[in-house]
Image: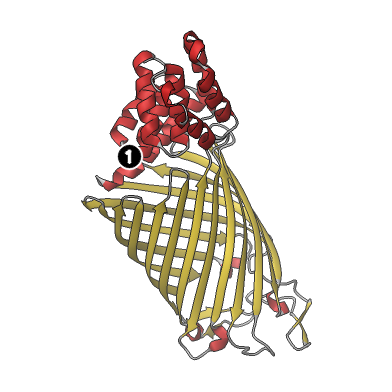
Amino acid sequence: MKISILAALATLAVTGVQAAPADDVKALLEQNKPLEAYNLGRANPGQLGSPIFDFFYGIAAIDAGHAGEGVLALERYLLSFPDNRSARFHLARGYYVLGEDQRARDEFQQLLADATGAEKDTAERYLDAIKAREGRYQPTATGYLEAGLGFDSNINAGIPGGSTFSLPGGTSLVLAPNSVMARSEDVFGTLQGGVQGTYPLAPGMAAFGTAGFDTRFHSKANFDQFDQANLGGSGGLSFLSDRNLYKVGLGVSEGFVDKQSYLTTTSLFGEWQHQYDQFNRFSLGAQVAGLDFHEMNVYTTLNKTARARVERTPTRDSTFTGLSAAWIRSFNTDYLPVLTVSANLGDEANRANRPDLARIVQGARVGLSLTPAPQWGMALGAGLQETNYKARGAFASSRKDQAYSLDGSLSYFYSKQMSVRMEAAVTQQQSNVGLFEYDRYVVGVKARYDFK
């Protein structure tokens, strides 16, 4: 919370004679310069023990990543002014940063007894985070259900029917207007849900597991051939050591298209997260997955007038190896922004002697989440994904795609359990094979209920 905290000045006026260094620390905090405020406080050790100085120095120390010093300063201050809510809030925040979850919970719960507005929302958010961290020590379980409705301008990522598209080497072809690859728009519905839990095995070590499903179904006649469903689950072990969290696990999922089993994915994954300080977290991930495709009955026309044929998709069987990295930066400013910068690199190696279906995938994404007002959340993102196939196949040269995307969402939380989210996304893909160039936008609204 910003320095609405500084309402404490009313009770601190009695110490104004010695307030000069404290005023300077306060001014730097108001300018969102906690590190400079902390360094200034450190340069005035003679002021420690003065209540007004301890108050501002304690906040600066916590915000600058020195929570231990900040907690000591605020504890000294509260000996003189035990009823100052702002000091209690920041003391609770300091306990949270230090991992003193029980003491942090006690302080936040005392504040909640008569908290309102932003103070109440922020205290509840910290209590939720404390509950999540308690998975280290006792079993936890959560779940959710979500339903939505939306519109997709290009459900099959196609080009306009009847249009001419180019191939490498200068050849041009015309796409039949009723082809299943012709661009199609439709209204769709979604339903998804999941559960997850942790079970501590030893100090710093826990077992975790997740299971979930998601479905998407379309409204127009015969467009059920684009309906999708996914079922999946994963489980593994997590290890917590100081500021480092390690995870290893196994996952399996089954994808369905038009009510037919399409793809089975079995994966081994690992992840390392490092909490550099209270504002910065880094992660690295690795994955090896087997992609096993199944035979399907498919149509070549949108209206299903042509006879269904068997698609021998097992020729796409492959092994995918991927790496990912992310930096998550939290800011202690208005709207509580969180910046996420991530990158990924993957190699899909075809196991059916089809190098034209093997590819290298690489991409990057930037995301920003905000809390613009109590009970509101916002997220914005932009990404780039590049795909390079390893052989030319039926084309004069190997296929190369670049997909650009923008997305955003706005959420409203009626309660800690019930929320509504509006979403929008725009994608444009460029390719050296014109058949795979497309643009697409998707908008929708979803309602979600969390079981905690």
Q: Nearer the viewer, residue 366 or 148?
A: 366
Q: Which residue is mark 1?
A: 99
At a point 34% along the width and 31% down the height, the residue shown is 104
Q: Residue at x 48, y 22 (%)?
A: 116
Amino acid type at mark 1: Gly
Side of 280 where 302 appears, left or right: right
Residue 125 image offset from top left, x and y in percent:
43, 35
Q: Is the C terminus in the top left, top right, bottom left or bottom right quadrant?
A: top left
Q: Is residue 30 visible?
A: yes
Q: Is residue 206 above or below residue 277?
A: below
Q: Position of residue 37 (x, y in %)?
A: 52, 31
Q: Please tell me which residue lies in front, 192 or 300.
A: 192
In this rendering, would 408 be left or right of 93?
right
Question: Foreground: 286 or 167?
Answer: 286
Above or below: residue 146 compared with residue 372: below
* Quarter holding residue 48: top left
| Up/down of 378 relative to 341, above or below | above
Residue at image coords 51%, 16%: 19
Query: How many marks do you count on the picture?
Result: 1
Q: Is residue 183 visible?
A: no
